[in-house]
Amino acid sequence: MAIRAFGQWQHAWTQSKFDGIYSVAHAPDSVQATRFTANPNLPEGRIKKLPNGTARNGMQQVILSGHNLTQLLSSLHEGSKEEDIAASARCSRLYNKLVEFVDLIDPDAEAGQTTGITYRIDDSVDAAYAKG
């Protein structure tokens, strides 16, 4: 989703701002930071990698702003129209998951009166539940 919405992303990144440290893989370097097609505006702390060795292995917790959500929805909607059937299916599935999330938001709620909504997107099947 992030690559489609912002032009680039790497799984190790936990922020989208270059922090001046060239040897750390958690953020884009100075050149990569200039290559975003849209500003993801994800400062340190907005993306958390959940611990390995747990039921959440490989999961990430991402705090999205309204701008991020709009950018993701727009790019996934466009991707759902692609001729590549696999890409179109992935985009459609993620787009529909985010639409389900948006439906949970009360547009009439007073600003600053909520700590946010937690929404989990995980279509993986735990090996313990797979029949082989």
Image (cartoon, helix red, strand yellow):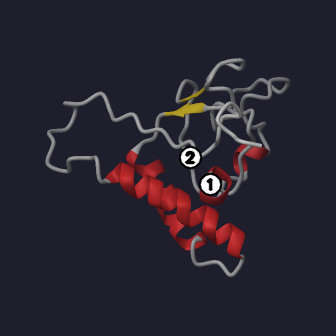
- Give the farthest residue toward the front: 132
| Label 2 neighbour load within 10 Å: few <14, some 14-19, many 20+ | many
Give the secondary structure at mark 2.
loop
- Give the farthest residue toward the bottom: 83
Quarter of the figure with residue 61: top right
**Spatial distance from mark 1 to mark 2, Cα to Cα?**
6 Å
Q: How many numbered discs, if any?
A: 2
Q: Considering depth in this image, is 88 or 44 the residue closer to the camera?
A: 88
Residue type beneath disc 1: Phe
Q: Which residue is mark 1?
A: 6
Q: Which residue is mark 2?
A: 40
Q: Position of residue 7 (x, y in %)?
A: 68, 57
Q: Position of residue 28 (x, y in %)?
A: 74, 37
Q: Residue at x 39, y 58 (%)?
A: 99
Residue type beneath disc 2: Pro
Give the secondary structure at mark 1.
helix
Q: Considering depth in this image, is 44 or 77 the residue closer to the camera?
A: 77
Q: Residue at x 57, y 72 (%)?
A: 80
Q: Position of residue 74 (x, y in %)?
A: 49, 65
- Asked if the residues shown at circle 1 and circle 2 are in contact, with their CB atoms under 8 angstroms apart, the answer is yes
The disc at residue 39 is: none
- Who comes first in sequence, dot 1 or dot 2? 1
Quarter of the figure with residue 78: bottom right
Q: Residue at x 64, y 38 (%)?
A: 16
Q: Considering depth in this image, is 132 or 41 the residue closer to the camera?
A: 132
Q: Residue at x 71, y 42 (%)?
A: 131
Q: Taking 95 as reference, is 81 left or right?
A: right
Quarter of the figure with residue 15: top right
